[in-house]
């Protein structure tokens, strides 16, 4: 179980690092665009398109790590007031819900990619096929699904997922308390 949790953590960390790279690249490109437009009076419209894609990339690639760390929107105050059994059940319902959404988005993303490749759809930027951008959806969603499934498995086997909020202090737990 520990190995699976670590493997998913590494995969999620790689996705988050790529999301961070997308964020930094977006920042640089927007800076270049502003300087080009207002200093040299030469707008670069392609940057606006690429920056939009990078925002999509950072959201989709950072979502799995946010789920892994339980840093998403949640109702932790309600869970902290529940009995331990109900708190575990609600966390399990939450992780299973995220896994289901991740699975649905993965399938929908693959369908979008397949259709775009089949029809030959392209972006507004010459030589950039639309499916390149659309690939972000199944990649990010599949990692999100995997993270949530592993969290569900840990909860089902009586363990405590890494970084599960305690309800009182919201500090991460460093280890799997039980079910290792």
Image: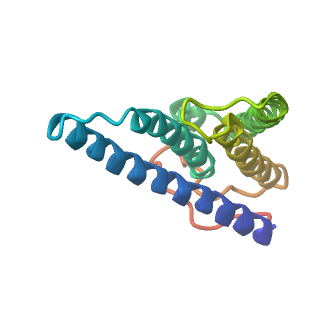
- Residue 116, image x, y percentages: 77, 30
Q: Report the front residue among 75 and 55.
A: 55
Residue 108 picture quarter: top right
At x 47%, y 33%, the residue is 49
Q: Residue furthest bottom?
A: 3
Left or right of 172? Residue 158 is right
Left or right of 129? Residue 51 is left
Q: Is residue 73 above or below residue 5?
A: above
Residue 7 picture quarter: bottom right
Q: Report the front residue among 135 and 72.
A: 135
Residue 43 picture quarter: top left
Q: Is residue 180 visible?
A: no
- Residue 5, image x, y percentages: 73, 64
Left or right of 107? Residue 95 is left
At x 77%, y 50%, the residue is 146
- Residue 162, image x, y percentages: 63, 59
Q: Report the front residue among 18 and 165.
A: 18
- Residue 20, image x, y percentages: 47, 54
Of the 4 image quadrants, the one containing the C terminus is bottom right
Of the 4 image quadrants, the one containing the N terminus is bottom right
At x 59%, y 52%, the residue is 65
At x 55%, y 57%, the residue is 18
């Amino acid at each position: 179980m520990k190995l699976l949790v670590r493997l998913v953590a590494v995969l999620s960390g790689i996705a988050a690092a790529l999301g961070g790279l997308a964020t930094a690249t977006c920042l640089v490109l927007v800076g270049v665009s502003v300087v080009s437009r207002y200093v040299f009076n030469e707008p670069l419209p392609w940057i606006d398109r690429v920056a939009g894609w990078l925002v999509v990339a950072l959201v989709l690639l950072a979502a799995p790590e946010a789920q892994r760390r339980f840093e998403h929107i949640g109702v932790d105050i309600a869970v902290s007031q529940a009995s331990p059994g109900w708190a575990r059940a609600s966390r399990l319902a939450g992780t299973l819900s995220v896994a289901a959404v991740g699975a649905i988005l993965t399938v929908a993303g693959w369908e979008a990619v397949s259709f775009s490749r089949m029809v030959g759809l392209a972006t507004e930027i010459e030589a950039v096929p639309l499916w390149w951008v659309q690939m972000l959806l199944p990649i990010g969603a599949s990692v999100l699904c995997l993270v949530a499934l592993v969290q569900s498995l840990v909860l089902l086997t009586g363990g405590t997922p890494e970084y599960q909020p305690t309800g009182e202090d919201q500090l991460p737990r460093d280890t799997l308390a039980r079910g290792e």
